[in-house]
Image: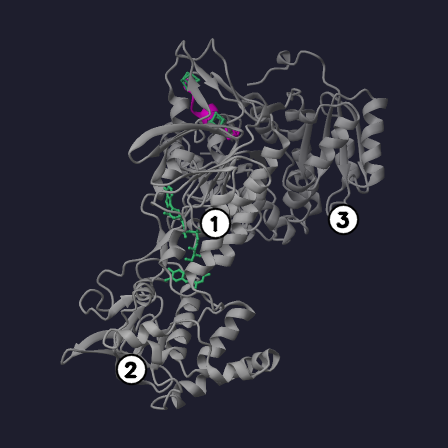
Amino acid sequence: MPEDTNIEKKPRIGVFICHCGSNIGGFVDVKAVTEYASTLPDVVYATDNLYTCAEDGLNNIKESIKEHNLDRVVVSSCTPRTHAPLFQRTCEAAGVNKYMFTFVNIREHCSWVHMKEKEKATQKAKDLVRMGVARARFLEPQEETKIDVTPAALVVGGGVAGMTAALSLANMGFPVHLVEKEKELGGFVKNLHGLMMTKKSANEAIQPLIDKVNAQKNITQYVNSHVATVEGFIGNYDVSIGTEGSESKEVKVGAIIVATGAIPLVPEGLFGYKEHPNVVTSMEFEELCNKKEIPKLKSVAFIQCAGARGQKVSYCSRICCNVAIKTAINIAENRDNMLGATEEKAEAEAGQVVEEPAAEMKAEDEGLERRRRRRGRGRREADEAADEGGAPSSGVEITVFNRDVMAYGVEHELEFNKAREKRVKFIRYLPDNLPKVSTKDGKLEVGYFHETLKMERTMPVDMVILSTPLVSQPDAATLSQLLKVPLGQDGFFQEAHVKLRPVDFATDGVYVCGTCRGPADIAEAASQASAAASRAAIPLANGYVQAEALTSRVDETKCTGCGTCVEVCPYGALRKNDDGISEVIVAACKGCGCCGATCPEGAITMTHYTDQQLLAEAKAALEEV
Amino acid sequence: MSSATPNAGGEHKLEQEDFEPRILVFCCNWCSYAGADLAGVSRLQMPPHFRVIRVMCSARVDPEFVLRAFQKGADGVLVAGCHPADCHYIGGNYRTRRRIALLRILLQQFGFDPGRLKLEWISAGEGERFQKTIVEFTDVVNELGPSPVRGGD
Ligand SMILES: Cc1cc2nc3c(=O)[nH]c(=O)nc-3n(C[C@H](O)[C@H](O)[C@H](O)COP(=O)(O)OP(=O)(O)OC[C@H]3O[C@@H](n4cnc5c(N)ncnc54)[C@H](O)[C@@H]3O)c2cc1C
Ligand code: SF4
Ligand code: SF4
C-alpha cells in the first residue's frame, strides 16, 4: 500500500469543482463537495466554478496556481475524454507539468446517472473527489520524448489503392517503396472487363495510373516481392523486402501503408458451381468477356449474395450488386456483340463489347434521362410480376435474383433504374429459400420461390452468374503479424476506429486503405488511399513524433530476465538487452500496462498509471468516512 | 461512506435495509469508460454505489489491485474492457479474461463468493449495456450482502 513517506515533497493540491451550469449543480450539492475537498490531505485550495472550462474558470485555475503555489491540479467536472487536453494546457501555461493533473468525472459518471438522489449523488461526488486527490498526491511530472522520423514510406500492394497512396506520397516528395507480390502492378482491376458507370474498359482506366507510377522517380517498385521482416516502430522501421530470384533488400521507412486488396470467394459447393460449366462467378464472367468467350446467351440469371450474408461469410460485400447491375446493362446493351461470341467469333471481334451506348440514350439530354430513370424506381414491385414473360427490349432475358439491391447513393441508384429500363428483372428471394440451380436434359435451370406471386417457379437459363463476396487475402494474417496490426473477425485489416479513424491502425505509423480493409469499389479504394497517404505524411513531414509519456519502465535491479513481459507486449515494445534484462523501446510502447500487470517480479512501473497511484485511488474509494 | 438514508435508493432492490454496497469498477479508457460516458450523456439512471477507476487497458488491472480492493472492504469488483477482438491494444483483453478466471478461483479460496468479481465487455457505443451491467451487478452484490471483510459472509 502506498505510504505517505513515499511522497518526497509535500504536495500542494488545488481542487476545482464545476457546476457545469445545472448539469452537475442541479443534482449534486457542489458547495458541500467543495467544502469537503478542502479538508482532504494536501489540498491547499478548493473552489467551485460555474463553468470551469470557460474563460474565467481557466483563468481561475491559472491564478490559483500562482497565488497558492499549487504543484498539482484536480478538476472535478465532465469527462477526461473530451476535456483533459484543455485543462492540461491550462496547467502548462501556469507552469505545472501536464502530468500533474487529475480529472474527476462527476457529471457523466455521477450527476447525470443519479438524477433523483441528490444526497447519494453528493456523497458519491465526494468519494470521487477523494479518489482523485489520493491519486494526485502520487503524481510525478513527465517529459514527453521526441522521436525522429525517417521521411520515407513503404506501401504494400500495387493495386488501385496502393498505387494511389504511393503516388500521393511520392508527389509530396517522399521516397516510396512499393511492394507487389504479382509480376506487375494493377491489382484486381487488371482482371476486369468494363467498369461501372464509365464507358471505359478496365484496362483503359488503370493504365494511366500505372504509367504515372512508372514515371514517378520517387517510387521504387518491387514486383514478385513480399515483405519479409519488419522491425521497429513509428518513424523508424527496418524493412526487409524479398524478391523472387534476387537478394533481399533492406530499407528504412517512417510509415507503412497496407493496401493488399481482397479476392472474390470461390463458391465451392454452392449453386451448382463447378458442376456445370455455365455456372460462373462474376469475376470469371469478366474474364470470359475479356477473352470474348461468352457462349450464346438468350437467358442469364445472376444470383446475388452467393456465399455472403450468412452463408459462407456473414457480411454484405457492398460492391456485388453494383457489379451485377453493370454486367446486366452490358449484356443488355451489347446483346448483338455478345450473342454466340464463340460460334460467331469474327462478328464478336469486330465490335467492342462495352463501348456502344444504347441508341435511344444518345438522343436524349442528360437531365431528362436522369429524371426518367429516377421515376422508374416506384415500379419495382409491379414490374416483378408484369415482367414475367414480357419481351425484354434487348432480346436477352436477364434476371437478378437478390435479397435486396444495395445500389447505394444517387449514381448507383440511377444505374439500377437504367438496368430496369432495359428490362432487367430483379426477383427477390429470402435467405431461407435460396434459388436452386439444376440441369434438366443437360440444360441449366433456376428454381425459385416468387415472393410476389407466392409460387414455386422454374426458369431455363443459358448461364448463371454468381455474385460472390470479396474475402480477405489468404496471407493477410502473415502481414498482420509482421506489422502487429489486427485483423477483424472477417479477416480484413481492422482500422483504429470505424468512424473517427478509418484509415489509421491503432498502432501509430501504420495505415490502411482499399479492399484489404473491407469491400470497396475503385472510387472508394482510391479516396481511402489518398486519406491514408495524407495521414502517413503527417509524421513524415513533421520529421518527428511526440510520444505521450504513458509508457512502461523496467527496474533493472528487480528484473530477473524471465521474458514474460516481452511475450505479452502486443507492440513488441520490450526486448532483452545484452545483459538479458528487459528494456522498453519508449517510442513503441503504447502504455497499455499489460506488462506491468504481468511481471512476476513487480519490476515494471507504468508512468502516470503506477501501482501506487491506482492503489491509492482504490483505497480512497473504499475508505470509511 | 455514508450510512443509508431511508428514502433514497427506493427504486433499487435492497436486500438489507441499511446495506450500501461498495463497488469498484475498473474501466478501460477506450471502450468501457467511453461506454460509461455515453450512459451519462443518455441520462441512463443507475444505482449510485459504484466508483469508476480509469485504466488504459483492462489488462492493466493487476490481480493485486483486485485482491487489495477486497481486502479493503469492497463488496464487489467489476472489470470492464473492450469486446474481444476490439481491444485498443490488440489483445490485452484476452489476457484479462484469463486472469479474471484465475482470480475467481483464488477469491473463493480466500472465502469470498466468486460472484463478487465480474468481467464484462462494454464498447464505447454501449451506454445501455453499461447501465444494465451496473444494475445487475449491484443486484448480485446486494443479494450477496456485505463482504466477509465487513462482517458479512
Ligand atoms: C467481379 C468484380 C467486379 C468489379 N467491378 C468493379 C467496377 O466495375 N468498378 C469498380 O469501381 N470496382 C469494381 N470492383 C472492385 C475493385 O476490383 C476494387 O475496388 C479494387 O480492386 C480495389 O483495389 P485495391 O488496390 O484495394 O485492391 P487490389 O486491386 O486487390 O490490389 C491489391 C494488390 O496487392 C497485392 N498484394 C496482395 N497481398 C500482397 C502482399 N502480401 N504483398 C505484396 N502485395 C500484395 C495484390 O497482388 C494486388 O496487386 C470489382 C470487383 C470484383 C470482384
Ligand atoms: S516480466 Fe519482469 S522480470 Fe520478467 S523480463 Fe519482464 S521485467 Fe524482467
Ligand atoms: S505497457 Fe504495453 S505496450 Fe508498453 S511495453 Fe508494456 S505491454 Fe508493451
Residue A140 higher or lower than A310, as above or below: above
User: Residue A244: percent from the left, percent from the top?
Assistant: 30, 36
Nearest to N terminus: mark 3 or mark 2:
3
> Relative to B87, is A353 on the left or the right?
left
Looking at the rendering, which quadrant does residue A96 occupy? top right
User: Residue A153: percent from the left, percent from the top?
Assistant: 51, 35
Q: Which residues are magenta?
A: A590-600
Residue A451 higher or lower than A162, as above or below: below
Numbered disc in front, either 2 or 1 = 1
Q: Examine the rendering and report whether any part of residue A468 can be seen.
A: yes
Chain letter for the residue marked with disc 1 in the picture: A
Pointer 2 residue Cβ closer than 8 Å to ligand 1: no
**Would you name the residue on which mark 1 appears?**
A211
Same chain for labels 3 and 2? Say yes or no: yes
Q: Residue at x 42, y 68 (%)?
A: A321
Numbered disc in front, either 3 or 2 = 2
Q: Is A592 contained in the magenta span?
A: yes
Q: Which mark is residue A26?
A: 3
